Amino acid sequence: MTINNRYLEKELSWLAFNERVLQQAADKSVPLLERVRFLGIYANNTDEFYKVRVAKIKRQLLHCRDQHHPQQSLLDQIQQRSLQAQHTFDVIYRALLMEMAQRGICLLDEHQLQSPQQQWLKDYFRQHIQPHLTTISLPNKLNTTPLHSAPFDLVQRLHHHCAYLAVTIKRNHSVDYALVEIPTDKLPRLVQLPASNNQHQLVWLETIIRYCIGDIFTAQPTADQLSVYAIKITRDACYALNQTSEDTVLEQLSQGLNQRLTAKPLRLAYQHTMPPHLLNLLKHQLKLSCFDTIIAGGRYQHINDFIDFPILGNKYFNHAPLPTIKSYPFSRAKTVFDAIKAQDILLYYPYHSFNHVIDFIRQAALDPMVSQIRINIYRVAKRSTIIDSLITAANNGKQVTAVVELQARFDEQANIRWARRLIAAGITVLFGVVGVKIHSKLCLISRQEQHQLVHYAHIGTGNFNEQTATTYTDFSLFTCHPEITHEVQQLFDYIANPTRKVHFNYLIVSPTDARARLNALIDSEIDHAQQHHPAGITLKLNNLIDKGLIDQLYKASQHGVKIQLIVRGMCSLIAGLKGISDNITVISIVDRFLEHARVYIFTNNGSPKVFISSADWMYRNIDRRIEVGCPILSPVLKQRIIDIINLQLADNITARLLDQSMSNRYVSRGKQPKIRAQTAIYHYLQRSEDHLQRLAHKEQKYHAKP
């Protein structure tokens, strides 16, 4: 087995992950409209993949211009797998449209409209759409520019986030071309028609534009024929900061993000009926090269908006609402601080209510005994109550420090706005360590209690985002353990002053000591296995692609350590390689909620060490980001995490095996009872909170006895 055959290419592994998302869209056990939304998730994931990962490969190839470069072979494999997935997508899309129509939910095109609908859409077009429309005339020959006109640069004229329709305008013996911008930033993408025959009838925004296309070009000589074709353009999302500039980090990033607006396209998706001349014209004007992806598709290219497909039809078309579980320790206590002082508290979203986190910061903002709040901001909700509470705290005279990561991908503009708002409120805003992203999920509250300062910490695997907390699975630990809160305080001090020396005994901190600590934990399991003591490693990660840590896991496997991995996304490790990874199994779970939590469990001779972490096992997370892993010290909470992970390992409904073939085979159920981990975890947590409540009631009755 050669070195290269020991790892899967991370990009191909990512495509396999997105194919698991596509599997959900085809799975008839998933409610109908949830399957439609999975199509939107798949399309959105694909866009980000091209903007980031394919763009990076293309830059490398353009830099070296070597047709035999290994990245060229990788790009070819990506193109081939993407084309296969696009075909699968188209088949599933058509099948879902048919099934929706059979169930009374119809997506109509312009040829299916009845007379009343036609008039309604014409009125809607004139009132709501036409005022926002802009068009771009295209040169009608490949290598000419109209006389006396400035050079034509289509790349510069296209807006970064907009969708377009390509139009051919035939008059007598001439043909002109134009692009029509679809105003998706101003109007809903799906428009619901007035109710008819107990059916839900919808049209795409571009369907209305297609139907009224003649009204757009009325100022020009009458056309013999207007033909409309969908296109989709994906640009490189990379940008570079001017490190030598004297501007502030905020100003540098604001300028750097403008690079995305004019970045060269790297993918063109087009309606397969588009005439060759128009396609060639677009390829030429967009300056597409042999490294770029050009892919044929259907009449609707921007399927991302299916993510927000409206809730229609009967209750079986959508997931039934899942009431969030309240944490009994928080609910019974007078304040969040009383609750945390009594015991460490672990929450698991979206099963538990994220309101407990909101209350943690809101109560701190209002509590006269709280003197200081420190927090990491990576991604927050569009309407963030967390931000509002921080501003309230500052208004109440508390010292508030917010570490805002300006380079959180695709949230940069939002974080720039948040940073400016926080600064305007008098909050100390830090932008972290140069060259290192801050991805930790920390909040530290300092409170004066009986002549001493007590610290309360939140350490999590997910963001302070009440919106994503309804769909992402993440752990939050609340603790006032002195040693842990001291180390959280140390980390915030280090971010404020990166020259200071720090040392951590409890927390696993990237890039300070994470690699060494993780290697040591794996080596310890190897030692236990060699001494015939209980040994094992269980990891739950989003991505596992760091080759150094993979080699450590291979080494542990070769020494007899049983390793169980749950990896949602990319996984370069290959399980089941003879003599290398015989003792390793890998599964992936894709279901109703996005698996986002990171958990490390080491058997440790029967006394398990359990950590939650913000870090995946990727080079960037271990060596180029500030990440935090935290040990779970409470035996009860430690067992709770182990139980949850065991339920996921037992999943035989939504779990897929990850292997060298990347075929996404479902785990075989055999004669075992059905276990859907996310459902089982919800009921497990309900029982756990009910048990705590019963114990508390028994304790109250005991103390109430005379």
Image (tube, helix red, strand yellow):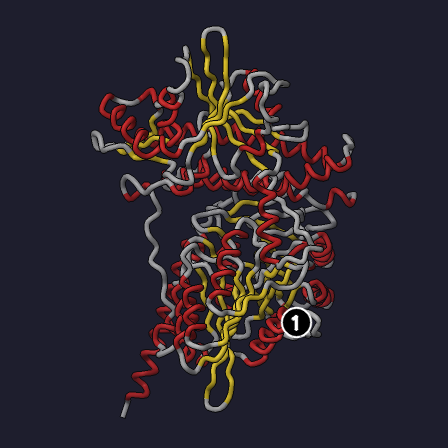
Would residue 221 be seen by someone viewing this image from the given angle? yes
Q: Which residue is drawn at 47% across and 30% down?
A: 164
Q: Which residue is drawn at 46% across and 49% down?
A: 672
Relative to the observer, which residue lies in front, 654 or 336?
A: 336
Horizontal and vertical percent position of residue 15? 59, 39
Circle 1 packing at 10 Å, graded few (<14), some (14-19), many (20+), is few
Q: Which amino acid does label 1 sit on?
A: Asn
286 up-or-down from 647: above or below: above
248 up-or-down from 33: above or below: below
- Specify the quadrant that holds the N terminus: top right
Which SS class for mark 1? Answer: loop
Find disc 1 in the rendering and name its residue: 497
Q: Which residue, as the protein is rendered here, is positioned at the far left? A: 197
Horizontal and vertical percent position of residue 201? 29, 31
Q: Which residue, as the protein is rendered here, is positioned at the far top? A: 173
Would residue 532 be seen by someone viewing this image from the given angle? no
> Number of labelled discs?
1
Q: Using residue 324 as the reference point, say whether residue 116 is left or right of it.
A: left
Relative to the observer, which residue lies in front, 111 or 537?
A: 111
Q: Which residue, as the protein is rendered here, is positioned at the far front? A: 148
Horizontal and vertical percent position of residue 600? 59, 62
Horizontal and vertical percent position of residue 56? 67, 41
45 up-or-down from 98: above or below: below
Rendered image quadrant of residue 117: top left
Relative to the observer, which residue lies in front, 544 or 188?
A: 188
- Specify the quadrant that holds the C terminus: bottom left
Relative to the observer, which residue lies in front, 221 or 687?
A: 221
Q: Residue at x 43, y 70 (%)?
A: 361
Q: Using residue 642 as the reference point, say whether residue 524 is left or right of it.
A: right
Q: Which residue, as the protein is rendered here, is positioned at the far bottom? A: 706
